Image (cartoon, grey):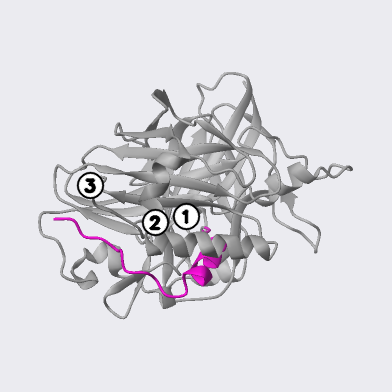
Amino acid sequence: MYYTTEKPIKNLRKTILYLVILLSACAKGAENQISTTPTPSLIQFSLTEIPTEQAMPYFQDEFSNEIFLGIEEMKKSGFRTLQAVARFGHSEDNLTSGTYVILEPGQALTGYILPVNTLKFSHDFGIFATLDYLPIQIQYNGDAESFPTLSLDPNIQRAFKFHLHPLSEGLHSLVLKFIIAPNHFFAFHATASDPIEDEALSFRDAPIEFGLLIWVTDSPPQSILDWPQQARSIAPENTTLLTDAFLVKERSKNGQPEMMLNTDTVNAGETAIYYIHPIAADIGKGDIPLRVLVFWDDILTQTDDLLIPIQTAVEQEYIPYMVHVPDNLSEGDHYLTVIGYPYPYYLRGWGDGSEWRTEVGPYSNLMAHIPVLVKK
């Protein structure tokens, strides 16, 4: 049995605009930081480029057309963005659109992704994939890579076919993230302005990603209320939309600008203390569960499950966050990447008791992706 979300979403063009509002999170304090031993998934996810004309016949549905129309209207208004438009299902004859899919045990997931770039300049994008909030290796055009790079020119579409092997029964979350200028060092206080760098910096933590909630079950639900409680218990009015959440080096003092974290120097084996600075758009109820992944280079070294009061995010408090530097890192330059996943598994809100909707926000936040000098 295959359960889809083919029904068009009302005001979809407005929904697309919501995708530029970043849903992320911050920590209440160091006492709420619970580190666990990372166990990356061994499941592989294949992403293979194909001719655009080969993929376009799968994007002739009303849902996709609404998305394309919304992107075109945003472009005419001067708004620039990158969107990942996707169709997916258990076979090419049963593709759908939306934010979730239900598969029978033993069914693989397949589909197509079109990165639609309306930025002014050409950029490279690092592709990062997680399953259940742990990294999975990408078979990119036949080669196994942890962080493949995709180059995109403005207004030039590229098409990819993806495949995910059958998953175990239960609830799963697939998130595919595009990180702009993945190997670029941004000098925040440069005297000369580079328009290409400025555009890349402005989209560094933008929600450029494709996320999907996957439920593998032999008992398809009759309504959204039949989903596991873990996937449907947080309503949109009980969540908080954040415009940003990122790591800084120091707290802002006496009205002085905060010290942005764009590079650092640390010692191998030490615990570096940073601060999470959230910027919230509004306020909801309850706390925000947050899964944080910490990478040194391409290796996951730390996972933290945080629970953050919403008021902390709304008031933009500075929250201590501890990052352990592995003692086996060689002396020299390395990359530190920190990604936060708010409301793990709650990728979408639900309204009217029957339909999922996308207004809750994007799926993850790139909190830091910086070069770090490690000393012994």
Q: Would residue 169 appear left or right of 373 to someone viewing this image?
A: left
Would you say 179 lies left or right of 61 here?
A: right
Which residue is at a point 23% across and 45% down the rendered structure image?
91
The N terminus is located in which quarter? Answer: bottom left
Q: 58 or 208: nearer the eye?
A: 58
Q: Nearer the viewer, residue 328 or 365?
A: 365
Q: Position of residue 80 (x, y in %)?
A: 65, 56
Task: Residue type at mark 3: give it.
Answer: His
Q: Farthest residue toward the right?
A: 191
Figure check: 133 above or below 277: above
Q: Position of residue 356 (x, y in %)?
A: 33, 69
Q: Is residue 7 magenta?
A: yes
Quote the CA–CA distance across marks 2 and 1.
Answer: 51 Å
> In this figure, which residue is indicated by the disc labeled 3?
90
Q: Which residue is mark 2?
A: 60
| Dot 3 or dot 1, earlier in sequence | 1
Q: Which portion, as a residue range, is magenta?
A: 1-26
Residue highlighted by disc 1 = 31
In percent of the image, x 42 and y 47: which residue is there? 56
Say which amino acid is labelled 1.
Answer: Glu
Q: Looking at the image, is mark 2 or mark 1 nearer the viewer?
A: 2
From where the camera sits, is residue 35 visible? no
Query: What is the crowding at mark 2: few (fewer than 14 residues within 10 Å), some, or many (at least 20)?
Result: few
With 164 as the anchor, is 241 left or right in this view?
right
Residue 299 in the image: state x and y as whole percent: 46, 30
Label 1 element class:
helix
Q: Secondary structure at mark 2?
A: loop
Callout 1 crowding tier (Cα within 10 Å): few <14, some 14–19, many ≥20: few
Q: Nearer the viewer, mark 3 or mark 1?
A: 3
* Label 3 CA crowd tier, 10 Å (few <14, some 14–19, many 20+): many
Distance of mark 3 from mark 2, alpha carbons? 18 Å
